[in-house]
């Protein structure tokens, strides 16, 4: 991997409602083994040596709590910002990117990368993170994903099958997703002008016509959405402790 020839920033959108967990707080603050999900997500990102700045988008009423979580999770000193979240994930990420656009810590003359990572993904394995970085440096943009193995149906509002979707070539993508910072910022600005939102960052970037490399993700890099996901995350942690 290239050393010191690039700077890496991370943006974590952590302003989602977490309503499907029924926890009465945003997902990033929901505890897993006594630590908020955001703590786990931040800790896993810090294995990247060239990570130089972290921006977290938070709901207004949770900004102070999120700041405290960050203080507890940062294993080394680093510029950190907490920016306001938005109505959609796309707005939360854009606020983070705009903060980075005004950040004065970018060094001129080297590459600037940005990784966007969900607060609700506590288990980013180091080896996946390294593969993503290597790929993004080589190819410009990298996203982890897993091929869909189930049969896929489109289901109508009455719960009846409307169509069977050919699963050939269909992947479920994860985060972190890594892009050239200036390219992703431009794509987000354009999307905002057009009033477009997306459920991931690659979709915004794809609209520029640039290619995005998808590399094999790992199933453990789950996104916590429901109580069942949380139970699965607890089981993964127990397995780690028991070393199985
Ligand atoms: O809702 P979903 O599971 O897609 O959210 C993915 C990530 O985006 C979560 O970390 C969530 O906190 C964040 N998000 C956000 N602002 C929103 C909606 C979601 O920061 N308005």
Image (cartoon, helix red, strand yellow):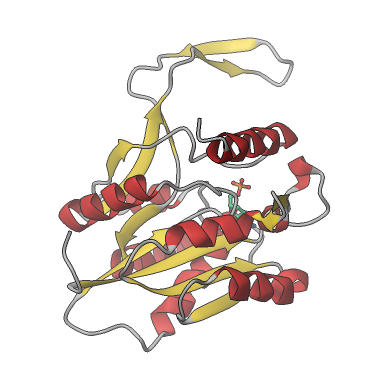
Q: Is residue 91 left or right of residue 78?
A: right
Where is residue 191? Give x, y as percent.
44, 59
Residue sitting at x 69%, y 49%: 33
**Numbered-mark total:** 0
Residue sitting at x 73%, y 53%: 30
Q: Is residue 195 above or below residue 222?
A: below
Q: Is residue 53 above or below residue 105?
A: above
Residue sitting at x 47%, y 72%: 54
Where is residue 46? Give x, y as percent.
43, 64
Where is residue 64? Give x, y as percent.
72, 77
Q: Residue furthest front?
A: 242
Evaluate whether residue 107 shows in this view: yes
Which of the 4 quarters of the picture holds residue 29? bottom right
Residue sitting at x 17%, y 59%: 1
Where is residue 244? Give x, y as percent.
50, 30
Evaluate whether residue 207 shows in this view: no
235 and 85: which is toward the camera: 235
Which of the 4 quarters of the picture holds residue 242? top right
Q: Is residue 147 left or right of residue 210?
A: right
């Amino acid at each position: 991997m290239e050393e010191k020839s690039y700077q890496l920033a991370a943006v974590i959108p952590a302003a989602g409602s977490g309503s499907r967990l029924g926890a009465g707080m945003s997902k990033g603050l929901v505890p897993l083994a006594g630590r908020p999900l955001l703590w786990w997500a931040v800790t896993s990102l810090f294995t990247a040596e060239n990570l130089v700045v972290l921006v977290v988008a938070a709901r207004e009423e949770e900004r102070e709590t999120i700041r405290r979580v960050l203080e507890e999770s940062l294993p080394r000193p680093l510029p950190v910002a907490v920016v306001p979240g938005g109505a959609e994930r796309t707005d939360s990420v854009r606020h983070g990117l705009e903060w980075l656009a005004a950040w004065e810590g970018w060094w001129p003359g080297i590459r600037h990368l940005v990784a966007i990572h969900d607060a609700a993904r506590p288990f980013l394995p180091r080896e996946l993170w390294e593969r993503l970085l290597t790929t993004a440096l080589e190819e410009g943009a990298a996203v982890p994903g897993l091929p869909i193995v189930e049969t896929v149906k489109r289901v109508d509002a009455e719960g009846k099958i409307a169509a069977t979707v050919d699963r050939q070539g269909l992947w479920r993508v994860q985060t972190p997703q890594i892009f050239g910072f200036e390219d992703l910022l431009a794509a987000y600005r354009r999307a905002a002008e057009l009033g477009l939102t997306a459920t991931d960052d690659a979709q915004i970037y794809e609209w520029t016509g640039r290619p995005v490399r998808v590399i094999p993700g790992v199933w453990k890099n789950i996104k916590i959405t429901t109580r069942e996901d949380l139970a699965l995350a607890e089981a993964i942690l127990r397995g780690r402790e028991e070393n199985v």
